[in-house]
Image (cartoon, coloured by chain):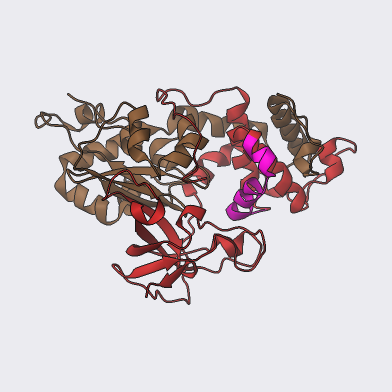
């Protein structure tokens, strides 16, 4: 939705406001704890949220999107059946139950995190300062309608390499179970005038993290 | 709000439409499946409500203001530096610190979802996750800053960082004038959460 018009004002709030309804922290914790079971990866989980129907994506509040995505990905990966979700059958014990996150393991799991940098056979082809063009389509190259992290507003835009972050798991592959396929990840800086018809300021810039396969050398 | 599930057959539509009931139903089901320990959920909530929040990030900023060697190391390799302070973890595995200067003001967003450096700033605020912020800040950062009551000098450029990968960005706001005699703990009080996202500036002493 980057660049979209018509969303209205941003409403600041004090730092001590963490959640806006009692069920919000529960939805957050349920998502984190279910993720720790390891039935699906982070990219599958994001793709499930982004694949909600446009109608649902628009009308759902933030944590409703999380719940919608979680229910969908749990059925897609076979962890739950539709009948269990609908409550028409008695739930069967899961073979993954031994990986359940117990309360005493929470601190350790949150502290450990899930780093996504990986060794890669793909050598960086760009260096800092190189001019690049982002791929024309903000779409998954292999799967029609599949996952990508290339924002539409930057597709086809010309920028340059600001820094190499290392090699990271490619979401476009990992979200579809095709493996982690790590490749070089860069911070790419685009002049605002390359992205918008009416930039606010001539020297404004937007930096987007992009994998090497999102980029072409600029002529 | 009326909920019309007739238009599609996503599995989630099988759950109750009321969000609070929906969460409860999913939790109950996952507990019965043996996949969720309700006490673990309580522990996760307690962690982000009470233990991990923006005071972690404020400690990092205050130290960067106070210690030039620390500042240089932070700008070079933030992940290692904040890990050494105990601020590593979920959604903060790969950190980059970006520094505001007289020439450039940095702001952070995730236009695709809501990526945010949890170990340093805690749970993202509601506005960070809002459609309005995600849609607008990349295109009209100054108008968004105006919503926060912030006005930048005309000569200053804005650089917006869109967190599209697993890199997480921490803004180091400019140290206010008149704080030369303040120690790290006093400086921390001037560092708001919003100033570390770039929608605010550091407070005045």
Give chain A's shade.
red
Q: Is residue B40 magenta?
A: no
Q: How many marks?
A: 0
- A120 is higher (above) or lower (below) than B43: below
**Residue drawn at (45%, 36%) of the image:** B133
Q: Is residue B24 above or below residue B131?
A: above
Residue A43 part of the magenta segment: yes
**Residue A25 falls left or right of residue B181:** right
Residue A112 in the figure: left or right of residue A14: right
Seen at 38% across and 72% down, the residue is A218
Dividing the picture into quadrants, the one containing residue B3 is top right
Q: Is residue B200 left or right of residue A179?
A: left
Magenta stretch: give its range.
A40-58
Can you give x and y, in whole percent of width and height, for residue A31 in the image? Answer: 62, 40
Tell me the brown chain.
B
Residue at figure coordinates x 23%, y 53% from the top left:
B73
């Amino acid at each position: 939705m980057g660049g979209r018009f018509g969303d209205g004002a941003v409403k600041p709030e004090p730092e001590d406001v963490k959640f806006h309804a009692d069920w919000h922290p529960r939805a957050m914790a349920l998502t984190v704890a279910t993720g720790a079971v390891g039935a699906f990866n982070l990219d599958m989980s994001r793709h499930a949220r982004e694949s909600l129907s446009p109608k649902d994506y628009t009308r759902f509040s933030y944590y409703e999107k999380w719940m919608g995505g979680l229910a969908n990905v749990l059925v897609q990966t076979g962890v739950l059946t539709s009948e269990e979700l609908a409550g028409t059958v008695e739930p069967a014990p899961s073979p993954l139950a031994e990986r359940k996150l117990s309360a005493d393991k929470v601190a350790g799991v949150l502290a450990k995190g899930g780093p996504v940098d990986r060794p890669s056979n793909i050598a960086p082809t760009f260096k800092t300062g190189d001019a690049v063009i982002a791929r024309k389509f903000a779409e998954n190259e292999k799967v029609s309608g599949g996952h990508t992290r290339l924002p539409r507003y930057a597709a086809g835009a010309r920028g340059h390499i600001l820094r190499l972050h290392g090699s990271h798991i490619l979401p476009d592959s990992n979200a579809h179970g095709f493996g982690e396929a790590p490749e070089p990840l860069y911070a790419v800086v685009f002049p605002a005038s390359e992205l918008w018809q009416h930039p606010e300021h001539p020297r404004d810039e937007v930096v987007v993290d992009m994998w090497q396969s999102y980029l072409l050398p600029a002529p | 709000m009326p909920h019309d599930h007739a238009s599609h057959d996503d599995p989630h539509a099988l759950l109750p439409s009321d969000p609070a009931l929906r969460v409860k139903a999913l939790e109950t089901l996952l507990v019965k499946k043996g996949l969720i320990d309700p006490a673990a959920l309580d522990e996760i909530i307690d962690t982000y409500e009470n233990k991990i929040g923006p005071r972690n990030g404020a400690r990092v900023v205050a130290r960067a203001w106070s210690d030039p060697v620390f500042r240089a190391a932070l700008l070079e390799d933030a992940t290692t530096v904040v890990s050494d302070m105990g601020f590593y973890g979920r959604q903060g595995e790969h950190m980059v610190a970006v520094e505001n200067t007289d020439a450039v003001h940095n702001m952070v967003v995730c236009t695709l979802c809501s990526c945010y450096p949890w170990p340093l700033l805690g749970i993202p605020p509601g506005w960070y996750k809002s459609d309005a912020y995600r849609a607008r800040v990349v295109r009209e950062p100054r108008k968004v800053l105006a919503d926060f009551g912030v006005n930048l000098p005309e000569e200053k450029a804005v650089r917006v960082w869109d967190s599209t990968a697993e890199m997480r960005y921490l803004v180091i706001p400019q140290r206010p004038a008149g704080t030369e005699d303040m120690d790290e703990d006093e400086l921390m009080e001037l560092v708001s959460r919003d100033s570390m996202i770039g929608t605010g500036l550091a407070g005045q002493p």
